[in-house]
Amino acid sequence: MEPSIRKRIRDGLAWRMRPVTRYVSRYRPVFIVQNYHRLFRDTLTTDFDEGVFGGISEEYFRRQLAHLARDYDVLSEGEVIDCLGGKGRFPRKALLLTFDDGYKDNYTLAYPVLQGLRLPALFFIPTLPWSTRQLGWWDLIAWCVKKTDRPTVTIDGEARPLGTTAEKAAAITRLLQKFYRLPDAETRDLLETLSRDLDVALPDTDVQSRELMTTAEIREMLDHGMAVGAHTHSHKVLSTLDRQAQDREIGTSKQLLEEGLGVAVRSFAYPVGTAHSFDDGTKKLVRDHGFSLAFSFYSGVNDPAGGIDPYDIRRTFRGHPYAGFLESFREPYTFIHPRQ
Ligand SMILES: [Zn+2]
């Protein structure tokens, strides 16, 4: 059968089944982990990667959370650990809020909103950017392309135009896709080549540092009900590393956070978090290092009744439009599908 015909039959069936799936979705218990990276204040202006903002302004974030807090029980990290450890039961509609990568606006914009609504959240901090005050390669690529006066950039032998903002945005997307596929050892060299080819120096440490939370800011959040998790040391995609290097990345990040912040670090998030960015061996290392929870990021919801793997807790990001956002949380099993 033609794949397109098969798809049409499947879509037709899905449509006919909608009332049933809606009913199931509404009454089946659910645990959703909504993930963010960055927020902007009013309009998005940045010299760095725009993709990590996901279109979420501070005001939009406030509206999302006010809505979710009415409909869902927002759990703390400790409550999730208890529920998965058999010391408690998930409420029927459970939600955990997480943030990745330790950006400054997590403290300046998200934290006040969370405090105002009295909601806890879990922040994953990669320890190399935090301790050396250096941004990830995705931000530095965006910086180089945005700042260059060169008319083109060569990607895989093909010259791409950089004349307009839209052309620059397309080139950044293309470069990020290329970098994501690379073994980590090659990313630093390629970044230096890009900086040279585009004739743009990488930003000074203080310019990079301003984009990241400080230790004092993280400590203040910890004192007010927030939690911190590990996200490797250098934010390498773990599947690109051998087992020993994975072990070092996971162990170092836990040790540095615990020493630097004086708290037990119990949660881990796989960098990038797609199904191919970690495997069973990685999960075992995370467990052996004493973490209680580990989070992926290939979408999907968690089913407390069907069993949840504490070392592959699904996370999702729902952004714009607001109407779609509301619908997706009202009927999560219909709308938030796992994407492999
Ligand atoms: Zn990350």
Image (cartoon, grey):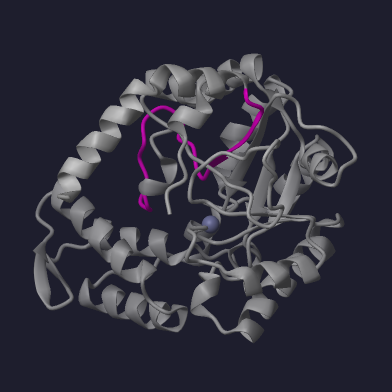
Where does residue 5 sit, x and y in percent of width and height?
Answer: 16, 42
The quarter holding residue 306 reads top right
Q: Can the viewer see residue 326? A: no
Check if residue 35 falls in the magenta segment: yes
- Asked whether 303 or 206 is in front, the reply is 303
Q: Quadrant of residue 12?
A: top left
Residue 56 visible in the displayed image: yes
User: Residue 177: x, y in percent?
Assistant: 30, 63
Q: Is residue 15 above or below residue 136?
A: above
Residue at the image point whose x is 67% and y is 67% from the top: 283
- Towards the viewer: 145 or 85: 85
Q: In this rendering, is residue 16 above or below 137?
A: above
**What is the quadrant of residue 32 in the picture?**
top right
At 47% from the left and 35% from the top, the residue drawn is 336
Say which of 178 and 325 sits in front: 325
Q: Magenta residues: mostly which secondary structure?
A: loop
Q: Which residues are magenta?
A: 28-49
Q: Look at 40% across and 59% down and name the residue there.
A: 139
Left or right relative to 1: residue 49: right
Residue 282 in the image: state x and y as whole percent: 64, 71
Q: Quadrant of the C terminus?
A: bottom left
Q: Is residue 320 left or right of residue 270?
A: left
Relative to 12, say whether 233 is above or below.
Answer: below
> Residue 133 versus residue 106: which sits nearer the camera?
106
Residue 121, x across and y down, in percent: 69, 37
In the image, is 8 to the left or to the right of 164? Answer: right
Question: Which residue, as the protein is rendered here, is positioned at the far right?
Answer: 87
Residue 126 belongs to the span the image colors magenta: no
Q: Tell whether 55 sits left or right of 28.
A: left
Count of picture labels = 0
